[in-house]
Amino acid sequence: MVSSTVIIGVVVCCCVVILAIALGVYFSAAPASPAPAPTPPVRSPAAGTPAAAGTPAAAGTPAAQQRVFADNGTASCTRYCGGVSGAPWNNELPVAWGGATCVSAGKNNNLACSYVGADPATPGQLECLCQKSPSTPWSTGSFGSASGTGPGP
């Protein structure tokens, strides 16, 4: 007759072996890398087709474009895309662009670049579509100032 202590010992040993095997399989599997955050497509107004953000433009297509969202409507998209104090406004555009101009304003691209105020489609903000333009350097003026180089208010 087998004692209950022996039976418990065998069961515990089996559980430990099974646990060790399971942990070995778990830790030997390659760790899953997190999926990169999705990049919203940038629409080319000329072609109307999405282009990946940050992708260099092919010959015959518009220069790099990027939509910005941090304008609360106190500045026009002309001013917002043009930057402030010699840099992109709120660091939303790549500094390496050297400058940018407004392509369109509003979530639906239905407002003039000179429009000042919140977009009725996105209360509290004004979305801008900006285009890389190294020939138009970042504005050196401060917010509320039309002084300096680059686009005005």
Image (cartoon, grey):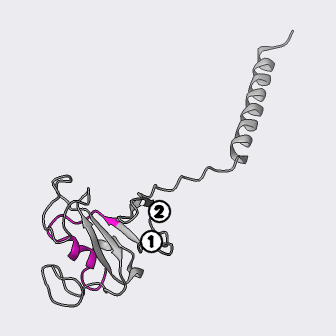
Which residue is painted at 20% across and 52% down in the image?
121
Query: Along the line of sight, which residue is nearer the eye, 78 or 9?
Result: 78
Q: Which residues are magenta?
A: 67-87
Query: Along the line of sight, which residue is nearer the eye, 4 or 70?
Result: 70
| Direction from residue 144 to residue 130 in the image, left or right | right
Estimate the spatial distance between the alpha carbons at disc 2 and disc 1, rounded to whole Å. 13 Å
Task: Give, as a three-letter code, the residue at label 2.
Answer: Ala
> Please, is residue 35 above or below residue 45 in the view?
above
Residue 119: within the magenta?
Answer: no
Residue 61's tag is 1
Image coords of residue 36 (percent x, y): 51, 56
Sequence-first tag of 2 and 1: 2
| Direction from residue 6 to residue 122 in the image, left or right | left
Which residue is painted at 20% across and 60% down in the image?
125
**Outermost residue toward the right in this view:** 1
Local crowd size for mark 1, using a 10 Å CA cut-off: few (<14), some (14–19), many (≥20) = few
> Please, is residue 14 above or below residue 99 in the view?
above
Image coords of residue 7 (percent x, y): 79, 18
> Please, is residue 35 above or below residue 96 in the view?
above
**Outermost residue toward the top in this view:** 1
Which quarter of the rendering shows the C terminus? bottom left
Task: Give, as a three-letter code, the residue at label 1.
Answer: Thr
- Residue 134: image quadrant is bottom left
| Direction from residue 128 to residue 33 in the image, left or right | right
Of labels 2 and 1, the one closer to you: 1
Residue 52's tag is 2
